[in-house]
Amino acid sequence: MVHQFPLRLIGSRMLAPSVRHLAFARDDGLPLDFNPGQFIQVHFNYPDGTATKRSYSLATIHDHALGPGEAVEIAVSYVTGGAATALFTALDEGQQIQCSGPYGRFCLMPNDSNKRYLLIGTGTGVTPYRAMLPQLETLMRERGVEIVLLFGARTPEELIYADDFYAFAATHANFRFVPCFSRELPVDAHPDVRRGYVQEALAEFAPSAENDIAYLCGNPNMVDAAFEALKAAGLPIPHIRREKYVSSK
């Protein structure tokens, strides 16, 4: 049987019109030790009592060199008519949900020797990259790694965690944040803003089999298109790491 533990909501805010950031604390007094890029599963019941679960990447920024932290943060996309949406919409501070985990292998690998990471995401698919920021900082300092984060959104108001990524880019010369907008550009756009789909911007960065490892997370169509583009550029499949987000009701 999967071990479940209680999380208590301690804070939340809207990141976009349909995306909510939620911060929890474990209510059993234990920390949640995880590798950035992993996810938790939230367990609940449909109205008819049938058990179900949903997976959410951990968004927590924590320096794991100091040991496991106490906060547990996720980003939840609201889906019209969704059972999980109903659960989280009704969740108030102080209330509990049941979770298990962490799970997954969409993580930075300790034996990587690449010169650059291409981190590509859409929507809440950038959540794991937020959690990776302390690790990326260490890799830049210790190995001189370069990082390009390509983030695809339809409009500027859907660019979640943009302040975190812009602030990180401003203080780390080897980190470049490239938002790609498919429908509407921001006013006074940053020089690194691009118009179009995120996978269309890949060619500009000349993916290289010798130098690059790529991470793809988010919309399945984007993940598939970017995977094919990277493969065509010569990246070996083990250097293209994927996580698809599929909406479920």
Image (cartoon, rainbow, N blue to C red):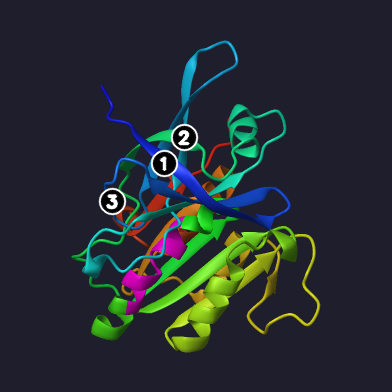
Horizontal and vertical percent position of residue 93? 56, 45
Q: Is 30 included in the stretch rendered in magenta?
A: no
Query: In the picture, residue 182 is in which quadrant?
Result: bottom right
Horizontal and vertical percent position of residue 181? 71, 64
Q: Which residue is mark 1?
A: 7
Instruction: Determine which of the numbered discs, if any, sits on residue 31 in the image.
Output: 3
Q: Residues within 10 Å of mark 1 (few under 14, many from 20)?
A: many
Gap in angstroms between the C-alphas marked 3 and 1: 11 Å
Horizontal and vertical percent position of residue 106? 35, 52
Dot 1 amino acid type: Leu
Which range is magenta?
Answer: 128-137
At 64% from the left and 35% from the top, the residue drawn is: 90
At 64% from the left and 31% from the top, the residue drawn is: 86
Query: In the picture, residue 89 is in which quadrant?
Result: top right
Res. 115 in view: no
Of the 4 image quadrants, the one containing the N terminus is: top left
